[in-house]
Image: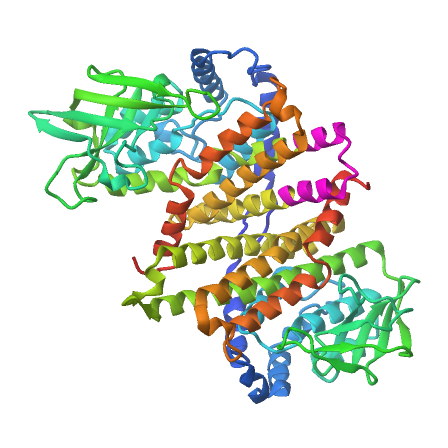
Amino acid sequence: MRAIFTEEQEMLRSTASRIADSVAVTTPADLVRLDRNKAWAALADAGLLGMRTRDEDGTPLASGVEVMLVAQSLSGALAPTPFVGAVLAADLLARAGAPEAWITDITEARARYAILLAPELDRLADAGALKGAICIDADGATHGLAFGADRRVARIDLAGMAALDGVDMTRPLGAMSAGAAAEPVGEPLSDADLTQWTSLALTLACADIVGVLGEGLRRVVEYSKTRIQYGVPIGSFQAVQHMCAEMLVETQAAASVTNYAAWAVDALDPEAGLLAARGAKAYCAPVAQKVGEMLMQAYGGIGQTWEHEAHMRTRRAMFDRKIFGDEAHQLLAIAELRMGRN
Amino acid sequence: MDYRENDDETAFRLRVREWLGKNAPKDWRAHTKTEADHGALLRRWQRTLFEGGFVGLSWPVEYGGHGLTATYEAILNDELGRADTPRISFHAYLGRAIFTYGTEEQKRRFLPPMLNGDIQWCQGFSEPGAGSDLAGLRTHAELKGDRWVINGQKLWTSGAQHADWCVALVRTDKDAAKHKGISCLLTSAKAPGITIRPIKISDGAPETCEMFFDDVEVPADQMIGRPGEGWRIAMTVLAFERGPADVGLIATFQTALRRIEGIAAERGLMNDPESRKAIARIYVIGEALRLNVMEQLSQRVAGKPPGPDGSVARLLLTRAEQAIRSLELEISGAAAFTDADDTSFTSYLRSRTISIFGGTSEIQKNILANQVLGMPR
């Protein structure tokens, strides 16, 4: 048993952090300034978009753990890059047996595939009922993926998609209207493939939360050492210290469940992997709100302003909380996995 | 990264399980009505475990241990919890003080009988005036010839009524700064001048004690470390006490969860979405604890000693244990309040002590803020 990262994984983390720093956002104005196409090309050049493509044996090039580490680094920097959506799309296409060229289009940044969710955001959109479906990580997306009644992945041309201002400013959404044509992809998905893909999706939503909040905590702690009130740094007040300690406990626990879920995606049998992923999301989802609120509180007045990053972190984490199902959704699913149907 | 046990670890787990099937005490709760019975049972059980080769797994062979990694301790604790055996070695973490700071002679004298159960220990740290502010302790020792003479009072010395020896923090230099004037002495708990009075906690059990020292003489060679080194020793001990893998509460959590699911089924709550969510939520909280502890354990096996970040797991443990006892109370319904055989309310009360002993939750947060996050004092 070795529940810690390998040296290679630690190296990947520092590489990913360097790339994330180059596409970091700290205020809404950065979203206008940053060249997003250049940012995307940087991710493609580093090979990060091809992490879930398959080798000759059909094994993913990188495990869930590596993908999680990259997702965390990017979300920590509030990077406005649709990384999670692109990786999930590549993984889903590979499982469906899509043409190789589609996948290399993604990894070489020639095309952008995104995931379509049902209007409630808790599951993949039904390819037969696309009206009102929401495209996540929609920035620059050319194609969307949904799931058909015949268990086949469907590809949808997003030319007619309407841009949608969701709460998360760093990752634009799209709204589907009626009439979009769905094109079936490859072969019907096996239960195992669909389950593993769902586990990966849940895990990456958690990774995004952990990255956003973990880096948010690091920054607010630094701020508390420099912000002076009553003649002393506010970080010397026990009330502020206990808030930060509580955030540390929650973000570390969230990281622990996410690390395990990320490992379980590929290492455990699909059902066990799904239980780990649902457990992770059930833990991380309420933490997203709790720590998001605490971050804004610990910053005080400055943390309520538009120009500050605090609300951008809260927005992103709370959107992650909803996608692929919030805690209520996961807890009922966990009850079913553990205790059977009611 | 790999959460799976390797072949050796799995083989060990199966060996423990098989051995427990044959040797674990049966119906021990029914046979231990008095505190004295309970103390005697723990002593016998530790001896049985020792003879089975399961005590001191991660301790060096020369002091009576087995020289294995901390992973094996965790597997053992897991199986002990699963088999619902009496909880032993409550104070084995005290041995870390002797192991880390003791002389070779002290280690050879005290560690083997600690592991085999011949000597039971208690922890003489807190005092009436030194709870959270442990460094404010006033029990003092004066060197007279080749003996230290202790006077003062200790409080919350759990298990002192069954103990043979005590690790006591005493002030040996009244002029030194608060943290610098403390030393660590090992004293017989039965030495002349020591009076022990049990204290009942809220659930009615005489779980802990107060301990009075009146001119208690301790040979000078029973000091651990140098004079003035007591605070550093205490911090080492507390770091181990705070590690949930050492105190072995995680496995009992999973057993308790299964029991609660059983009660929920009996009371027809398995179809109630709110109850289902509440039970699943406790499962998730338990997983967060288990997985955080596995990471800590892996770091320890990789050579990183326990430090202040152990307070994270300690707070998760506190939360998990208190949440599951609240749920048990909720799921048990009115019977918890009216049925004399229903133990959920006493379990609930007992769970409230966890956010106090070994450092309150507020002290744990101070440690995290100051020592892990580096926030100014």
Where are the magenta residues, as a range? B259-282
Residue B94 lies in what quarter of the image? Answer: top left
- Which residue is found at the position 51% from the left and 75% from the top? A309
What residue is at 66 percent from the left and 67 percent from the top? Answer: A319
Left or right of residue B77: residue B283? right
Residue depicted at 66% across the width and 50% down the height: A279
Q: Position of residue A63 (x, y in %)?
A: 65, 61
Residue farthest to the left, as pictured: B145
State the image coordinates of residue A205 (x, y, percent, origin top left): 66, 63
Whether A285 is drawn above or below B139: the answer is: below
Q: Would residue B123 be found to the left or right of residue A254 on screen?
A: left
Indicate the position of residue B285 as horizontal and vertical percent values.
59, 45
Image quarter in which the N terminus of chain B is found: bottom right
Coordinates of residue B189 in the picture (x, y in percent):
27, 19
Q: Quadrant of the C terminus of chain B?
A: bottom left
Q: In the rendered view, how is the structure colored?
A: rainbow
Give the residue at x 39% y 29%.
B92
* Magenta segment main secondary structure: helix
Please say whether residue B273 is one of the residues in the magenta stretch: yes
Looking at the image, residue B329 lies above or below residue A285: above
Q: Is there any visible trace of residue B119 in the rendered image?
A: no
In the image, taking residue A291 as reference, residue A185 lies left or right, namely right
In this rendering, the count of numbered labels is: 0
Residue B296 shown in magenta: no
